[in-house]
Image (cartoon, rainbow, N blue to C red):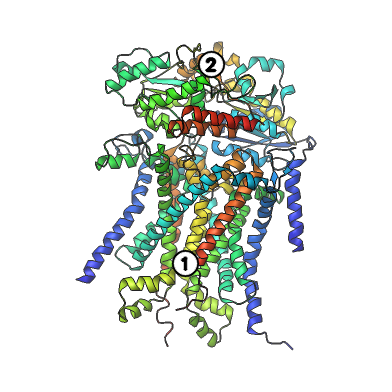
Amino acid sequence: MKTIRSMLFALIAIVLIASVVGCQPKQASGPVTIRVLTMEQAGPTVDEMNAIVAEFNEANPDIKVEIEYVAYDALHDKITTAMASNPPAYDVFLADDIWYAEFAKSGYVLDGTDRVSKETHDKIFPAAWDITTVNSKVYGMPWLLDEKYFFYNEDLLQQAGFEAPPATWEELLAQSKVLKEKGIVEYPMVWSWGQYEAAICDWVILLYGNGGSLVDDKGAPAFNNEIGVKTLNWMIQTIDDGYTNPASISYVEEDVRNVFSQGKAAYAVNWTYMYDLVNFNKDESQVTGKIKMALMPAFEGSGVESSSINGSMGFSVAATSPSADAAWKYVEFLTSESIQNKYSAHLLPMWQTSFEGENLTKLEGYTPANAVTVPMFNMQFPFAHVRPKVPYYPEASKALQLALQEALTKQKTPEQALNDAAAKWVDLAK
Amino acid sequence: MKKKLRVVLLSILVLLALLFVYVPVAWLVISSVSSRSELLSTPIHWIPQQPTLQNYINILSPSQGTSEVAKTFRITLWNSLMVASSVTVIALVFGSLAAYALIRLRFPFRQTLLIGILGTRMIPEISLVIPLYLFATRFGLFNSPIILVITYLSFALPFAIWLMAAFFESIPVELEDAARIDGCNRLETLWRIIMPISAPGLVSTGLFVFLTAWDEFFFALILTSTVSAKTVPVAIAEFTGRYVVDVGGMMTGGVLAAIPPVLLSLIFQRYIVSGLTAGAVKG
Amino acid sequence: MQRKRTLAQQDMLVGFALILPSFLIILGISLQPILTTLYLSLFEVPRGINLQQTFVGLGNYISLLSEPIFWATIGRTLYFTVISVGIELVLGLAIAQLIHAHPPGWQFLRTSLIIPWAVPTIVNGTMWRWIYNADYGALNGLLLQLGLIDKYIPWLTRPDIAMNLVILADIWHSVPFIALILQAALATLPADLEEAASVDGATALQYFWLIRLPLLRPAILVALIIRTVEAFRAFDIIYVITNGGPANGTVTISFLTYLEMFSFGHAGRGSALSFLISIFTLALAFIYIRMLYRPEEKL
C-alpha cells in the first residue's frame, strides 16, 4: 500500500508540474538535437527534407535534426500530448492555421515576433502571416500556402453550349439548369459539406462571396445575420433543385475529387492538390485533359469580386523547448527564400519574390499542373480569408459544422441553426 | 434421407456464412488491385478491367519514389507481430493461472477481485493516454515496444482472465477431484488435466488478446514515434494525407495485415479438437 | 518440524501466487492513470502550460448530466451497443453452433472468420465508407444491378440510416469474436452429453434450450461484457465512416469524450465523461451478471 501511495504521489506530482509550472529551461549550448514533427505530403518529400537538413548542417554542424512523420489527423493530438511533458517531445512542429490561436493561448508555441527581421516580414505574403500571427504576435513561420479553387469540366460545359466558366454563382446556376435539362450531368455541383472542417471552408467561401463574414470587427459572430441565412438557404435550395449532389452533405474533399474525376460533376471547389490528379493522372481520373480552373465566383450584388479560404500551415518552435534558439535557426533555414525556391516542386513558396522573374518561370515549369495552379494562386490569393483566430476554434468550428448539418438535413431552419451556433460562440468567448 | 437433408441444409448455411465473410473481403481485395480511376467506374467493375499490383509492389518491394509509409510498412508489420505475440503469450500464461485461482480456489475476496479486475477495464482508454504517456517518457520507455506490451497487457489481462475463467467453469469439477484422488496437487492438476481440455479456450482467448493488441491504434500512435516501434494501425493511418486518401494503399495494407493472424490461427487450429472430455467422467 | 498446511491454507497460498503477476501488471499500469483521471475530473483543466486548474468538485459531472446533448449521446450509444451486440450474439451463436456441427467446410469457415476480425479497424471503416458511397459505392452498385433501387442513394446523409450502416460495419468486424469464443466453449463441453440427451429422447430444441445454452452461459456472459465495453468505446469506426455526422447522428459517448479531451482540450470535463462512461458500462455489466452468472451451478 505504501509503495502504491508514494508512486501515486510522485506521478500526480509529475502531472501537476508538467501542467502548472512553466519555468523556462536553460538554453542548451554545445551539440544539440532537435526533434521535428511534421507530416508526409507537406511539401518536400522525405528525401528532400533530408537534403535540406544536410544543407543546414553545413552551416550548423552542431545542430542535429531528427524528423518524424505522422498522418495529418494525428498531428494535433501528437502535439498536445508532446507538450504535456517537460521538456517537450518535439522542439519543432508543423501546425495547422486553425490551431494557432489555441496553441498561443496554451503556451505551446514560441513567440518569434522579435526573431523575424523586418526584411523577412515584408518579403513574405501578408496573407501568409495571417496564418501564424495571433494578436499581432508571430508564433511561427508560414508553410505550405494553400487555398480553395474553382474547378470546372470544360468538356461538359461545352456540351451544354458554354464556352466560358461562370463569373457569379447565379450564372453558375443558370448553366447548371441547362446542363441538367440536357441530361449532360445530373448534379452539376458537388461540395464538401459533410461534418468536417471542410464544410466550414466551403461556408467561408460562400458567405464571404455574398458579402458576409464569420465575425464582425469586435469578434462577435456575424454568420447568423441576414446574409448568413440567405447563403445557407441558397445552399439548401441548390440541393432541393437538384443542382448540388445531395451526397455533399456527407462529403469531404476526397469525395469531391472522386466525383469530379468520374465526370459526374461539372463544377467543384477544392484545394490545389486536386488539379494535378484530376487533369493529368489517368490512374486517378477519368476526365484528364478536360479540367480548367477559374476565379472563384461570387454572388451578384454582394460587392465582392471573389472569395476563397486560406488553409495553410506553419512551422513553430515549442515554447518550452530547451533548444529554442537552435530550433528557431532550423525553422528559419527551412523556410528561407533560397530553400523554398530550390524545393518548390511540391509546395507553393510564401516569398513574394518566388513569384517573380526567373523564380516564377521555374515554379511554373515544375509540372504541367504548376503552369496552371501557380498563376491561379496569384490571382486567387488576394481574396483568401482566414478563419477567426480564437483559442476555442475547434469547439466553435464543431458548433458551426453542426449548424450547417442540421440545416442541410432539414432538422432546423437556417435561422435557428445559425443562431444556436452563434450563441455557442458567444458562450465560448466568455 | 434425413441425414442427407441435414447435411444439405447445413452446407447452405455454411455457404451463407462464407458469403457474409467474403463479399466485403472480395471488395477489399478488388480495391487493392484497382486504380482509383477504375474504382470510380459506374456501373461497378466487379472484376477490374485493368488490375494492377502496384500497391503490393509499393509495400513489398518499394523503390525510390514510393511513399514513406509503403516503404516502412513491412517493418511495422514485424513490430506489430512482436508486440502482439509477446502480449498474447504473457497474457495467456498469467491470465489462465489467475483465472484458475479465481474460479477453483477458495480464498478471501475472491469475488471482489474478479469484479475489481473487470472494473479496471471500465474506464475508457482515452483518459489513460496522457498519464501513460508521461509515465513512459519519465521512465525512458517512450517509443519502445516494451511500453506497448505493458499497456496492452493491462488492457487484455482482465478480459483474458474472465474468458479463461468461463472456459474453466465448464470443465466438470469431478475431473479435478478424480485427479486429486490420484495424488496430483493443485498445480499438477492444472497442468496435466485442465490445460489440455481447455485448449480450445486457450486458442480463442489467445486469438482475442492477439487481435486486441494487433488492432490498437491510439496508444500506439501516442506512445511511438519512429518506425522502429510503430505498429500496423499507425502505419495504415499514414496512408491518409491532409486531403488525399491513398485508398488502394490502405486496402492493400489491410489485406497484408490480415494475413499473420490467419496464419497463426491455422497453426494453432489443430489444438481445438473437441470432445476431449468425452467419457472422462464415467461412473 | 514443518506443519502440514491445511487445504484451505494451501489454496490461499497457491491462489495468491497465481494471481499476483496479473494483479501487479493490471494495477501497476492502470491504477495511477485511473486515479489521475478521477482527480482531474474534479477540476476545470484548461489546456496548456502555465494555466491554473480550478477546483470545481462535482461541477463537471453536474454540467454534463444536465446537458440534453449528453443524454442524447447516451441514447445513441445505447442504441448502437444494444443493436450491435444483440445481433452479434444471435449471429455468433448461430455460426458457433454451425461450426460445432462439423458440416462440410467447417474448418474453412472457422479460419475465414478471422479475416473480418483481423482487418484493422481503420481499413474496415474506410472500406465500408467506400461501399456506402453515394456516387461510386459497391452497395449502390449491387442494389442497382439487382434491380432493388433505380438510382444511387446517398445513404450516409440520413442520420438514422447512417447509424445503422456504422452498426453493420461494426457487426461484420465483431461477429467472428463471439462466434469463435462460443465455438471454443462448445468444443470444451463434454461431447457425450449430446449422445446422452438423444438417448433420453430429448428433441434438438429442448437440448439447445435446456442443456446447451445454460452450459454456454459463462462464455456468453463474458462475450457480452467484452463486446458491450468495446461497443461503448467505439470511436475509430465512427471517426472514419462519418466523423460523427450527419448532424451528430453518429456521435457516441466515446466520440464525445475524444472531442472534449483532445479536440477541445477540456481535460477535466473529459475525465468526468470517462467516469460517467465507466459507471454506465459497469451498470450494464452488473445487469448481465445478475442475469447470467450462476457461480455454483453444475450439471
The residue beneath circle 1 is: C219
Above or below residue C194? Residue C132 is above
Q: Is residue A277 visible?
A: yes
User: In the rendering, at what x and y percent does residue A149 appear?
Assistant: 47, 21
Q: Which mark is residue A383?
A: 2
Above or below residue C129? Residue A48 is above
Above or below residue A345? Residue B63 is below
Q: Secondary structure at mark 2?
A: helix
* Number of residues whose C-alpha sits closer than 10 Å to that of mark 2, classed few (under 14), some (14–19) or many (20 or more): many
Residue projecting furthest to the left:
B1
The disc labelled 1 sits on which kind of residue? Ala
Q: Is residue A292 left or right of residue B177?
A: left
Q: CA distance from mark 2 to mark 1?
A: 63 Å
User: In the rendering, at what x and y percent does residue A122 appear?
Assistant: 66, 14
- Marks 2 & 1, CB-CB < 8 Å contact: no
Residue toward you, B103 or B196: B103
* Number of residues whose C-alpha sits closer than 10 Å to that of mark 1, classed few (under 14), some (14–19) or many (20 or more): many
Q: Which mark is residue A202?
A: none
The disc labelled 2 sits on which kind of residue? Phe
